[in-house]
Amino acid sequence: MEYLIEFKEATFTYESGFADPVRALKKIDLQINRGEFLAIIGPNGSGKSTLARHFNGLLVPTTGKVLIRGISTANSDPEKIKEIRKRVGMVFQNPDNQLISSIVEEDVAFGPENLGVPPAEIRRRVNHALSALNIFKYRRESICHLSEGQKQLVAIAGVLAMKPDCIVLDEPTALLDPFGRRQVLESLKKLNREEGIAIVFITHFMSEAVHFKRVAVMDHGAIKRDGPPEDIFNRTALLEAAGLDIPVSAQLAGELKKRGFPVDPGILHAEELVSSLCQLKSKV
């Protein structure tokens, strides 16, 4: 089976003439198909950002392989690298480092223009990307007048206009307020649901990760576990060993169970906990 993205025992070592080498990734095996909705979590220094930069060849493994639709990211053919970066788009933490133009629609058009897309098709892609992210009304706005959350949506729109199979986002909400984080997360859910685009979302907010269909836990350069959030967030020892918080609703549900309340298993969201408690109350 050919995966959209496949890591095969990929390792990465940072070399420096002034310090000992640092092994940032350790034999990563990871497979991603079209339409995945994956969150990668881990403490600072766990290798998350290094991993993110391997998805489209910004970094290449020291040993092992990363394949994008069977094409190695270590390929020396410029056309192959161009194909990889068309398939996998990157969004980083600070949108100001990724935005090029001063006007929203001009910035979103920048990527397709560099790909040599005809003008009529660029216009169609720009309008589609802005509409998909609910920011079409800002198309002629100056980017400096936007909120940080809106800027991040413009950065995502710029990647979307290049028609990727997958978008990788490295801590894209770290600089945003709660409203901006919700705005970005809801937009990504919509892209995944309606466009079928695979989303790889790197975050340290457990409240965001619980919304994903699949969660991978990184620690000390390795993926410790990969599975549905119901499995991951009920493994208290795993999360504590990695220095990660347990989602508040899951933590509260666990405490209630310890005290003898038969709440539903696998609770991750506040709404699920409230529903379970209401059901208990109706049985009393």
Image: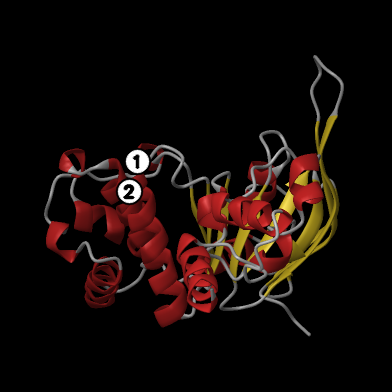
Q: Residue 27: where, in percent of width, then height? A: 88, 53
Q: Residue 176: where, in percent of width, then height? A: 37, 41
Q: Residue 171: where, in percent of width, then height? A: 52, 45
Badge 2 amino acid: Gly
Q: How crowded is mark 1: few (under 14 residues within 10 Å), some or many (20 or more)?
A: few
Which residue is found at the position 24% from the left and 66% from the top?
134
Nearest the camera: 10 or 214?
A: 214
Label 1, label 2: how many angstroms apart (C-alpha)? Answer: 5 Å
- Residue position marked by numbered label 2 in the rendering: 180
Res 216 → quadrant: bottom right
Which residue is found at the position 44% from the left and 46% from the top?
173
Q: Residues within 10 Å of mark 2 (few under 14, many from 20)?
A: many
Q: How is the image coloured?
A: secondary structure
Q: In the visual, does 145 lie left or right of 110?
A: left
Is residue 204 visible from the viewing direction of this image?
Answer: yes
Q: In the visual, does 173 lie left or right of 151?
A: right
Is 198 located above or below residue 151 in the figure?
below
Q: In the visual, does 205 lie left or right of 73?
A: left
Is label 1 in contact with label 2 (beta carbons under 8 Å)? yes
- Residue position marked by numbered label 1 in the rendering: 177
Res 140 → quadrant: bottom left
Which residue is found at the position 63% from the left and 71% from the top?
264
Is residue 57 visible from the viewing direction of this image?
Answer: no
Quarter of the image where the C terminus is located:
bottom right
User: Could you say whether the residue bearing mark 2 is in a helix, strand or loop?
Assistant: helix
Residue farthest to the bottom, as pictured: 1
User: Could you say whether the residue bearing mark 1 is in a helix, strand or loop?
Assistant: loop
Res 131 → quadrant: bottom left
Nearest the camera: 121 or 269?
A: 269
Badge 1 amino acid: Asp
Residue farthest to the top, as pictured: 18
Quarter of the image where the N terminus is located:
bottom right
